[in-house]
């Protein structure tokens, strides 16, 4: 009897729990049955109210019969029964997940309103894009295309998601009204070879070139492209086997930063795409976020276009010819254009007359030397350039030789006053450097002496000149990314640098350490100031430390000092240089990291005003006021050490006002032609922001 009671005591709690569970489940089912229709009715009312908000003149909405043929981002279309237009709902990928938004577009194709229904963007950053009535959404009202949408500073990912949604809305409108959207036709990457086809599709014996790819007896090659860092296109060939599985990629990332973006073209990264059903199955490449994202996007495009390429029209291979190199305009033509009827005399490295001068200079580009003819008037003002970019990649580097870019050099006092050409960074930097050489040697050419001795254009080390009796050697240092960067510089009697050695043991190997290599230090030979040497792409902080230390040595030389001199005082904390992934592009030539759309730091206890500085043409000081959440509420800039009329523009409200409402400087573009000073302002603002967060 006791045994039975014991068994019952063990089983009875279970029975009770089962009964309670059954009762609760039943109660929930009854509750759900009662509340579900109420919730659905409330959701329907909310959706109907949203339709009235985004398309105020619409009524009698009815869902479209089909979404077939519409962009994949479009998830719903409601047609206004009174002919007022459409309400189109989209879903795109934001920083914090899917963004579901509703847009009204009237019968003429103009957006009448927008409302975000679902989003998970970072508060204070991406939320500025998706909030009702935000400046981003306000700008959409009345738009008939997506060409002029302005991203919200510091919230690039969220802005891009909404921009893609708007593009889908406009495309859907065209299709709903009987129109068609012409799909882009992609071409082969410049580096794709027959050997690649043989290697990735073993045993291939039949290859047919078709629109958008190649069809073979062993599989299909589909061409695609997507925008990478700095707006440069990344071209991809995706190889599919006979079962339509991806077996490999060939990627042309020549528009991306060497050593940074090009990391995403390494076999160790590309091999991860073999066998995937979506580019999204592969993580981004650390340090090359933008380039690898472009590759992932291109893979998705190729997957979507595979079926179409397999039945595409055959291309006449004989009609496919290499793009001819861009020829520079003949010097005689420009001479006649700028100096009609004037007779010039040939001199070393140029031509001279009483009306003006032509100086010819060269600098290292992407594929070789870029030759530049610089035309000066009788007051030594630049009238224009002609460029031979035949060594550069056709359609990429050659873009920097087009008149639309070269016209920006007219009247400048330095090649650094012109921004690099988007997508042709190395070629346009070569042009800028050649212009600076021409400016520095103008008097020498006018005197018939040609260009002065300059550092070698190649990567080979420049032999140091043996020190003369009156040479001065100075050693000093400056703060780099990982620690002090030490230099030893030898000056000739005239103050020109004869040799420079750099010791940077604590800088990141393969990145900052490049500032100690001869290919960079040789650029200082022959100059009298580090300001004439550009920072090293991809190692901005380390190379800026070299420049700072050199300028410290220059000042010491001018004051009659020699030997070891103390480094210049560090004004601000150095920004981060590591090549980690970033979400927000910054206007620099590397894919170096910047503060992303990560969750905001905990707000400070109270508003703060912080002063910081950075090196422009001279020292640039900023005074930044942050509110308790780290948002900039006021900014003043001291540009008294900068070039009047150029760098001084950075203290004007038209520029400083762009920082208001942001938490750092990453979303603010540099002023065209005033890159050095405006970048200094941005660096100082970011230093102040870092100090605010660290308090």
Image (spheres, rainbow, N blue to C red):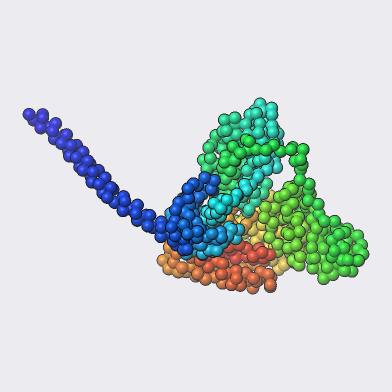
Q: Is residue 403 left or right of residue 564?
A: right
Q: Position of residue 43 (x, y in %)?
A: 37, 54
Residue 634 visible in rendering: yes
- Between 51 and 667, the residue placed more toward the observer is 51
Q: Position of residue 515 (x, y in %)?
A: 66, 52
Q: Position of residue 57 (x, y in %)?
A: 47, 63
Q: Is residue 654 left or right of residue 525?
A: left
Q: Name the residue at 48% across, 50% down.
A: 64
Q: Is residue 24 above or below residue 5?
A: below
Q: Is residue 54 above or below residue 226?
A: below
Q: Residue furthest left?
A: 1
- Between 598 and 638, the residue placed more toward the observer is 598
The part of the image, by quadrant, that contains residue 614 is bottom right
The part of the image, by quadrant, that contains residue 668 is bottom right
Q: Name the residue at 52% across, 43% down.
A: 280
The part of the image, by quadrant, that contains residue 612 is bottom right
Q: Is residue 358 above or below residue 94?
A: below
- Between 414 and 45, the residue placed more toward the observer is 45
- Between 609 and 285, the residue placed more toward the observer is 285
Q: Is the N terminus in the top left, top right, bottom left or bottom right quadrant?
A: top left
Q: Residue furthest front?
A: 82
Q: Name the residue at 67% across, 55% down.
A: 422
């Amino acid at each position: 009897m006791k045994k039975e009671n014991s068994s019952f005591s063990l089983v009875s709690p279970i029975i009770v729990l089962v009964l309670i569970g059954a009762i609760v489940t039943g109660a929930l089912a009854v509750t759900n049955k009662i509340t579900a229709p109420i919730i659905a009715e409330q959701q329907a009312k909310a959706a109907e109210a949203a339709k009235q908000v985004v398309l105020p003149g619409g009524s009698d909405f009815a869902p479209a019969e089909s979404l077939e043929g519409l962009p994949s981002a479009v998830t719903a279309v409601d047609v206004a029964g009174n002919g007022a237009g459409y309400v189109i709902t989209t879903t795109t990928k934001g920083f914090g997940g899917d963004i579901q938004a509703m847009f009204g577009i009237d019968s003429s194709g103009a957006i009448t309103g927008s409302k975000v229904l679902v989003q998970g963007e970072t508060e204070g950053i991406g939320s500025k894009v998706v909030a009702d009535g935000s400046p981003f959404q306000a700008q959409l009202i009345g738009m008939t295309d997506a060409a002029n949408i302005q991203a919200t500073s510091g919230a690039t990912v969220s802005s891009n998601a909404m921009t893609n949604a708007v593009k889908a809305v406009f495309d859907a409108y065209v299709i709903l009204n009987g129109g068609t959207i012409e799909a882009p036709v992609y071409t082969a990457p410049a580096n794709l070879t027959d050997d690649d086809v043989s290697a990735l599709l073993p045993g291939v014996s039949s290859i047919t070139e078709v629109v958008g790819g190649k069809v073979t007896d062993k599989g299909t090659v589909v061409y695609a492209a997507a925008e990478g860092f700095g707006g440069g296109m990344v071209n991809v060939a995706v190889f599919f086997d006979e079962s339509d599985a991806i077996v490999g990629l060939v990627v042309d990332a020549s528009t991306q930063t060497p050593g940074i973006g090009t990391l995403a073209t390494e076999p160790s990264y590309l091999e991860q795409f073999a066998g995937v059903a979506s580019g999204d199955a592969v993580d981004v490449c650390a340090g090359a976020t933008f380039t690898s994202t472009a590759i992932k996007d291109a893979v998705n495009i190729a997957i979507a276009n595979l079926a179409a390429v397999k039945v595409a029209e055959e291309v006449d291979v004989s009609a496919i010819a290499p793009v001819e190199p861009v020829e520079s305009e003949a010097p005689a033509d420009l001479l006649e254009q700028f100096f009609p009827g004037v007779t010039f005399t040939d001199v070393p490295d140029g031509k001279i007359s009483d009306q003006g001068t032509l100086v010819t200079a060269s600098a290292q580009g992407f594929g070789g030397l870029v030759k530049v003819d610089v035309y000066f008037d009788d007051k030594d003002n630049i009238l224009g350039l002609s460029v031979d970019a035949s060594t550069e990649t056709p359609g990429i580097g050659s873009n920097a030789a087009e008149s639309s870019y070269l016209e920006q050099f007219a009247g400048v006092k330095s090649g650094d006053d012109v921004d690099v050409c988007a997508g042709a960074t190395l070629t346009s930097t070569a042009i800028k450097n050649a212009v600076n050489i021409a400016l520095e040697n103008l008097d020498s050419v006018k005197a018939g002496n040609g260009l002065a001795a300059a550092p070698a254009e190649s990567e080979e080390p420049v032999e140091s000149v043996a020190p003369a009796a009156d040479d001065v050697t100075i050693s000093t240092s400056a703060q780099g990314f990982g620690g002090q960067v030490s230099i030893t510089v030898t000056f000739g009697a005239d103050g020109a640098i004869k040799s420079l050695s750099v010791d940077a043991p604590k800088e990141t190997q393969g990145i900052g350490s490049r500032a100690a290599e001869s290919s960079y230090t040789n650029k200082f030979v022959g100059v009298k100031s580090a300001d004439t040497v550009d920072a090293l792409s991809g190692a901005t902080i380390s190379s800026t430390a070299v420049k700072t230390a050199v300028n410290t040595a220059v000042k010491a030389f001018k004051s009659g000092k020699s030997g070891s001199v103390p480094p210049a005082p560090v004004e601000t904390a150095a920004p981060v240089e590591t090549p980690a992934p970033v979400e927000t592009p910054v206007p620099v030539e590397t894919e170096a990291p910047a503060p992303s759309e990560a969750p905001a730091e905990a707000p400070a206890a109270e508003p703060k005003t912080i002063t910081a500085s950075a090196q422009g043409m001279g020292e640039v000081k900023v005074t930044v006021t942050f509110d308790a959440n780290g948002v900039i509420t006021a900014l003043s800039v001291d540009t008294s050490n900068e070039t009047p009329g150029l760098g001084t523009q950075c203290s004007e409200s038209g520029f400083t006002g762009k920082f208001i409402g942001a938490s750092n400087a990453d979303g603010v573009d540099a002023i065209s032609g005033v890159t050095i000073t405006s970048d200094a302002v941005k660096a100082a603002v970011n230093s102040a922001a870092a100090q605010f967060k660290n308090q």
